[in-house]
Amino acid sequence: MSQYRFTLEPYISSKNRYECPSCGEKHTFTRYIDEEKKEYVGLEVGKCDREQKCGYHLTPKEFFQSQTSFSIDHSHQNTTINPAVLRQVAFRAKQKTQPASFIDEELFLKSLEGSHPNNFLIFLESFIGNAAIAEVMGKYKIGTSKKWKGATVFWQTDEQNKVRTGKMMLYNRLTGKKKKVNWVHSVLKLQDFNLKQCLFGLHLLNSDKQKAIAIVESEKTAVIASIAYPQFIWMATGGLMNLKASMLKPLANREVILFPDAGCHGTWNEKVADLPPNIKYFISDLVEKKATADQKQEGWDIADYILRIWRVRTIYA
Ligand SMILES: [Zn+2]
């Protein structure tokens, strides 16, 4: 049985996101569909969006392997799929074979001019000097957007220096906490844009072939950690669901150290099994060991600890 026969149902609206069979949360559960039979696999076969809080994920393979242990009556399950979903499936399948689209270079370069305030950089300025800010801005090509006053753009630039998209984020300039998020390709409403995300920081891959790659979830964390620990090349997935084979493929034959947020060590550990085998992985338990129960609940990451040290340094400097 081909694994590729099954796919997670593409999002149409909250109507095709269901109640999770594990945590019971409504509109969080994505079901698997059988592309060949054009029907759902099973009521409980799917994935909960709440990756950290719930983490339920039953794949069709696991389902069929252990079907005898399920006592659910399948005769009542809803197997009719909305035609819009099937069109989406076909569209996505076609997209996979098409090359990635890129963001216009002029727009990208304009965002680097820095003629507008950038709250993230203002926040960093309270801890580190201007020279270090300029260095990190250049290294990660951190942009500024007028979309919201003070907005930052974290460009996803690939190993060929092509811009896949940009994540626009608005931070509170005093606390550094995230307030708003949007994507450059969706703000520009680009027609037939074939989005293929890459790791934030991927363009640094070949800047030093001896260095190991350190991977975190958030872009902000990658930037901050790169200042504190320059012995690694820091990259960010931009989200837990992006810790997947297609995103890590360009890192073939390199050493990769994964730095999960507090409370996520187990989830990352599980995901490594599905990542490309030609990469040497280490999963750091630094944050997991250091975190208190509250910090785990709040999902602290390595940057939170770095910032805490920087704060103390600023107070006593
Ligand atoms: Zn759930």
Image (cartoon, grey):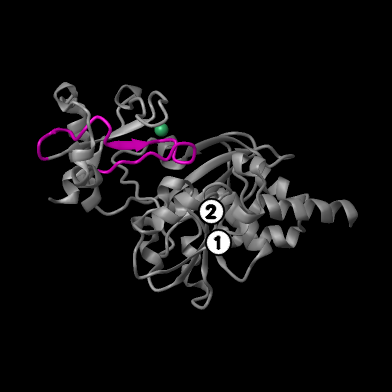
Q: Residues within 10 Å of mark 1 (few under 14, many from 20)?
A: some
The image's mark for residue 186 is none
Depth order, front residue of 6/252: 6
Range of magenta residues: 36-59
Q: Which amino acid type is shown beneath numbered disc 2? A: Pro
Residue tagged by mark 1? Answer: 284
Of pointers 1 and 2, the one earlier in the residue sequence: 2
Dot 1 falls on a residue whose secondary structure is loop
Q: Is residue 160 left or right of residue 143?
A: left
Depth order, front residue of 287/16: 287
> Measured along the vertical axis of the image, is residue 240 above or below residue 71?
below
Image position, residue 143 (x, y; %) = 57, 49
Image position, residue 134 (x, y; %) = 68, 59
Residue tagged by mark 2? Answer: 260
Residue 26 sits in which quadrant? top left
Q: Which amino acid type is shown beneath numbered disc 1? A: Ser
Q: Residues within 10 Å of mark 2 (few under 14, many from 20)?
A: many
Image position, residue 214 (x, y; %) = 53, 63
Image-quarter location of ligand 1:
top left
Question: Separation of disc 1 and disc 2 at Cα?
Answer: 7 Å
Image position, residue 75 (x, y; %) = 14, 24
Q: In the displayed image of the protein, which residue is found farthest to the left?
A: 37
- The reply to whether dot 1 and dot 2 touch (C-beta < 8 Å) is yes
Q: In the displayed image of the protein, which residue is found farthest to the right?
A: 316
Residue 33 sits in which quadrant? top left
Residue 256 within the segment the image draws in magenta: no
Residue drawn at point x = 19 percent, y = 50 percent: 3
Residue drawn at point x = 21 percent, y = 33 percent: 42
Residue 40 within the segment the image draws in magenta: yes
Q: Is the residue indicated by label 1 positioned so its CB lies within 8 Å of ligand 1?
A: no
